[in-house]
Image (cartoon, helix red, strand yellow):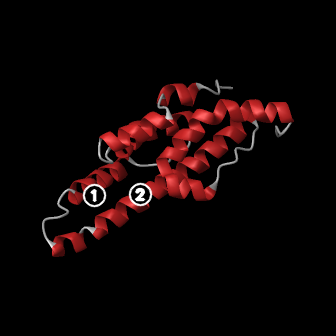
Amino acid sequence: MNDINQLKNRINTKTLNFLLLTIVTFGIYPLMWIHKNHNIISEVTKISIFKDSYTIIMAVCVGLESFAGFDIQIDLLLIIPEVVLGVFYVMFSLNARKALQAYALNEYKIKLKMNYLYTIIFSAYYINYCINDLPNDLNKSQLSGDNIA
């Protein structure tokens, strides 16, 4: 059995810092965080959640968004990369949610409760929060006796 803090320690990002870095980098940091950490999540949970090519597609979408404001016709076309980017963020979050829940159940016999709506709305921020909260979830389940035997 792995240490419950392994995933938290390897990713090592506080959620507040994540949010502040997103503001400072004008929204680019979540993409960098996903690119840096999706392989770590997959390695620890032993479940593949995201392909490297998806992060490249997301980076292209972010790059295309930098052309906003040049022309009305271009702005209308930029809706497409924004939608694609949003879909990839949600896809990452749902896959990471599923992997974290399976990891918690298989390794620690706890049923990890992650809000589906929060996963969609807050995407990578919520995944990061849940990763940081894994040790607390284990302690709560041990205290309440909610472990699955």
Vertical placement of 137 versus 125: above or below?
Answer: above
SS category of the residue bearing label 2: helix
Residue type pointed to by label 2: Phe
User: Mark 1 near mark 2, Cβ–Cβ under 8 Å?
Assistant: yes
Q: Position of residue 75 (x, y in %)?
A: 21, 70
Label disc, if present, on residue 79 of the rendered structure = none
Label disc, if present, on residue 61 of the rendered structure = 1
Q: Residue at x 64, y 34 (%)?
A: 134
Label 1 neighbourhood size at 10 Å, few (<14), some (14-19), many (20+)?
Answer: some
Determine if residue 19 is in view: yes
Residue linked to disc 2 = 88
In front: 44, or 125? 125
Q: Quadrant of residue 78?
A: bottom left
In front: 49, or 130? 130
Q: CA distance from mark 1 to mark 2?
A: 10 Å
Vertical placement of 62 versus 5: above or below?
Answer: below
Q: Quadrant of residue 37?
A: top left
Vertical placement of 132 versus 23: above or below?
Answer: above
Q: Earlier in the sequence, mark 1 or mark 2?
A: 1
Q: Position of residue 44 (x, y in %)?
A: 55, 33
Q: Position of residue 85 (x, y in %)?
A: 36, 59
Left/right placement of residue 120 relative to residue 112 reads left
SS category of the residue bearing label 1: helix
Q: Quadrant of residue 100?
A: top right
Left/right placement of residue 135 relative to residue 141 reads left
Q: Quadrant of the N terminus?
A: top right
